[in-house]
Image (spheres, rainbow, N blue to C red):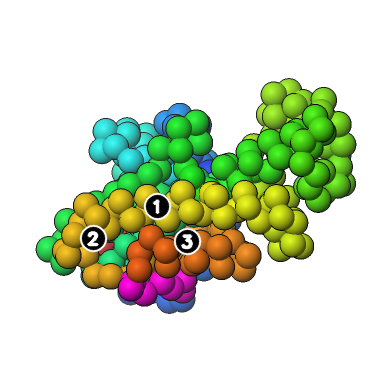
Amino acid sequence: MPPAPLYIGLDAGGTKTAALAAAGGEPQRFDGPGAQLLRDGVEATASTLVALVEEARRAFRGAPLGGVAVGLAGAGRIGAQEAVAAALRPRLDGAAVAVTHDGDVAYRAAWGDESGLLALVGTGSFLAARTEAGETLRAGGWGALLGDDGGGAALGRAALRAVLAALDGGPPTALVDRAAADGLGTLDDVVGAIYVDKRPLASFAGLLLAAAEGGDWTAEALLARETNALAQQAGWLATRAGDSVAQRVAMSGGLAREAVYRASLESALGRHLPGWTVSHADVAPAEGALQLARTLAP
């Protein structure tokens, strides 16, 4: 009997990429570096994805590749999705490949084909809704330079701005001591970390979350501001959809697993979506990508 085909689903975000691979049995998970199309470009993105696919293929001892599905941050446009798929196919033996936005696979994992709303919060942020008629509506996901309210990059930027303000004589905050413990004890350290060392803004999101969890008023206010901005977008999306979307919203992504963040976003969503059910997605987005990969079976 020929070996079962191998299906691989990848959830590629700005900070890390998670892959689930299965060939008839239980899926195995593989983790790799992040991939963000707008930041990295087509070729670098494809190389990151191929490396993780090849790792999975080695683990499955050369099982024939049945299909690969990728939910990719920064791939909101059809043309961009097709460009990445075209770069992947020849490097994956011509296997069936589907590339979509990372929010699409996260939605599939959370709600399947049913109606609802998804708030995806990781390095960036994104909102998607599906109507009862199957139409997909989106909001946010504008990238760190223009938006991504409530995402990791926005939290990190807010934390560092508060540190800089305090060092300039502004309101005191526990963020200063936490930044100093990370080697950012002076103005030059903070500025150099971003503009010289090119450290990702999202890598400082943990400073804000830890300070907020510790009761620092400034950090709590900044976290509330960011999650409120994201929830406001969810309200806009719900208004656009009217009565055509089931009144339920699921939170997904790395930040949604952080208790202090989840509590803040839940509170904000309750204000902007009164009467809606708010929950945390229990199924990982990579599972949604694997589901999509299995649909590529010949």
Tell me, yes or no, whether the two marked residues, 2 and 3, touch with CB atoms within 8 Å: no
- Amino acid residing under circle 1: Gln
Q: Residue furthest top?
A: 196
Left or right, 211 with reference to 237: right
User: In the depicted view, which residue is nearer to us: 260 or 36?
Assistant: 260
Label 1 packing within 10 angstroms: few (<14), some (14-19), many (20+): some
Label 2 packing within 10 angstroms: few (<14), some (14-19), many (20+): many
- State the image quarter where residue 106 is shown: bottom left
Q: Residue at x 61, y 68 (%)?
A: 259
Tell me, yes or no, whether the two marked residues, 2 and 1, touch with CB atoms within 8 Å: no
Q: CA distance from mark 1 to mark 3?
A: 8 Å
Q: CA distance from mark 2 to mark 1?
A: 18 Å
User: In the depicted view, which residue is nearer to us: 266 or 60?
Assistant: 266
Q: Residue furthest left?
A: 133
User: In the depicted view, which residue is nearer to us: 152 or 212?
Assistant: 212
* Residue hosting label 2: 130
SS under mark 3: helix
User: Earlier along the polypeptide chain: callout 1 or callout 3?
Assistant: 1
**Res. 266 in view:** yes
Q: Is residue 279 magenta?
A: yes
The percent coordinates of residue 188 (x first, y second) are: 82, 25
